[in-house]
Image: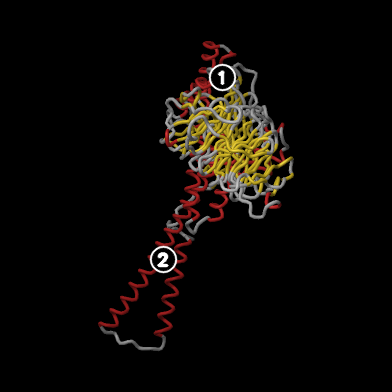
Amino acid sequence: MSFKILADTFSIARDSSHFVQLKTLKSPRTEDQIWVAFKIEGDSKYARSTMQSIIDTLDEVFFDHLEVDVYERFENALKEVNLTYKTLLEKRGQSSVGLISAIIAVFSGSELHLTQTKEAEAYLIRRGKLSLISEGLSSKSNDLFVNIASGELMPEDKVIFATSRLLRMTTQGKLVQMCSEGVTEALDAIRELVLTDAELSIGVTCISTKLPYRNALNLGGGNAWLGKFQKVLSKAVNFIESKLKGKKIPVDKNNILIALGAVILLLILSVSFLLNGQHDSQLREEYKARIEAMNQDLHVANTKGYADDKETANAILEKVEEEARIILDSKYFRPEALALLEKVQATRDSINNTTRLTEYTPYVDLSNKKETVEALGFMNLDDNFFVFEYNSLFEVILDQVLDPKLIDESEVVINGVAMEDQDVLVFRTQAGRFIEYDEGQFSFVSTDDEVWQNGVDFASYGKYLYLLSPEKNQIFKYPRLRGKYGNATEYNLDAELTGAISIAIDGTIYVLKEGGDIVKIFKGEQQSFAIESLASDLSEATKIHTLPEHENMYVLDPVNRKVVVLRKDVGLGARYSSQVFFEELEGVVDFYVDKKEDNLYLLTKTQIIKIALR
């Protein structure tokens, strides 16, 4: 009897001195399969080629001469693997080949043949009991693989191959409990166990044996659809008999045609019923197989995520999500599809280092001082917040809000910035005028130019204001003098600033553009800038923020209610680090991260929300 094999795998290599690979070898000429689980410790320079040499040898020898008994073919293949291993040792030396812990197993019909070396172990779970089936296979011989264990498999058996000893981390009973459900759930539990050991590198394969599926339209004895057909036909005959009971029907041409028509109609209905049943059964089997495949894809995505291949991991998750939604829209396996979507979200969040906030405690509530407040933005000066709306300024000392101050009776403030080195706040108005707040007093400030340039955002660095003007494809730089500002100089030399909406400075200037692109400028010249492993869409971002003290830059997306964290000065630009979702918080208009990057502050029209980042 041949079994249907359901399997899932997980591997993690903690550092460059460990190489882990799990692989399945098949041939179109036979149903026999080879499953390998390898871990190589040592110089990783040759690990991949060592592994490939062993795989090629297994594949070539085992699947040749299929007329030979499977055990003999396996034995011959292992002999050749040992020769390959010895050749590599002689050529490269032990330090370059490394220490190999491995399981090689052959599934043939209902038979399992396996061999083992070093730390690798194989477990069989049958009827709630666990057996170590690789015990005693190691040898002090110079050969890599020496002994073979063979046995019969049964339906619902679970087989685990591990490149390190799992039972040093848990008990037999707990491992059996972890594997009490499907292979996907079993591997989830084993993964959680493995990840508790920060130094362990391991590969794990979990396999379950199932009886093969037989086509539902095989009309052999006891077939369900044949039984249903017979029931329908029997009911139809009984119905006709009941209608004709006690009546004499003249045998003429019309009655014969009516009887034939009734028989044909019954046949059509019965065939239609059977075909519908066949289609329904086929769909169920198709969706069931797709769900199993999607669960395996989830684990592949997990493995890619742990290897920091976020792009591939997220592409796999997107594919699984699309397929799960297709199944969800059908009438089949809806609970399983919903569970898959939840797993996709959880896996995506884990891989992308995502935090989702569900509860918020206001740091301060501005409406306690002014019920109609509609905050536009806020600044931090000397570790105190200053929140502004169109004509008022609220000072926040620790977690207390002071009474609002009138900025100006006629001007409408649109944004503001803190000049920390100058110990002043600067506001820009709708009319293009600038107002300073210095030592508790508001005053208009001028420039040596006739008028201030127009812009969409501005920032400060040292004694300078930098005004972002995409209209003129320029960043205007104003020095602060005593009681006024000097002439504007054009800072930008070659960057394209069309669509620019926000600016941040840490010595280097970062400009956020509509659609999420970020431009980096240093000493007036555009620098190469790319974001590695970006796992979050920035197309709806509106503000960018960083400080000279920060290791990261932060991007606010109020539409999708998130802040994306990017690690600065990595490669040619930055690297995606994490993201914080505030899905239950509406109307965020501005944000700030303190100098130590311990806390994120979100500003709504009425409140400041404080969120711990560490």
Q: Is residue 50 above or below residue 401?
A: above
Residue highlighted by disc 1: 44
Q: Position of residue 22 (x, y in %)?
A: 54, 31
Tag count? 2
Circle nearer the N terminus (2, 1): 1
Tag 1, which secondary structure? loop
In whole angstroms, how far apart are the C-alphas of marks 2 and 1? Answer: 61 Å
- Residue 493 in the figure: left or right of residue 535: left
Q: Position of residue 55 (x, y in %)?
A: 49, 25
Of the pair 94 and 382, the residue shown nearer to us:
382
Of the pair 242 and 464, the residue shown nearer to us:
464
Of the pair 484 and 405, the residue shown nearer to us:
484
- Residue 258 in the figure: left or right of residue 105: left
Q: Residue at x 44, y 35 (%)?
A: 470
In this rendering, the label closer to the viewer, 2 or 1:
1
- Residue 608 in the figure: left or right of residue 576: right
Quadrant where the image shows the C terminus: top right
Tag 2, which secondary structure? helix
Q: Position of residue 3 (x, y in %)?
A: 52, 43
Of the pair 58 and 165, the residue shown nearer to us:
165
User: Which amino acid type is shown beneath numbered disc 1?
Assistant: Ser
User: Which amino acid type is shown beneath numbered disc 2?
Assistant: Phe
Badge 1: few (under 14), some or many (20 or more) residues near its Cα, within 10 Å? some
Q: Which mark is residue 380?
A: none
Q: Position of residue 298 (x, y in %)?
A: 54, 41
The reply to whether the C-beta atoms of the residues labelled 2 and 1 are less than 8 Å apart is: no
* Residue 444 shows in the view: yes
* Residue 154 shows in the view: no
Q: Residue at x 54, y 42 (%)?
A: 429
Residue highlighted by disc 2: 273
Q: Residue at x 70, y 37 (%)?
A: 384
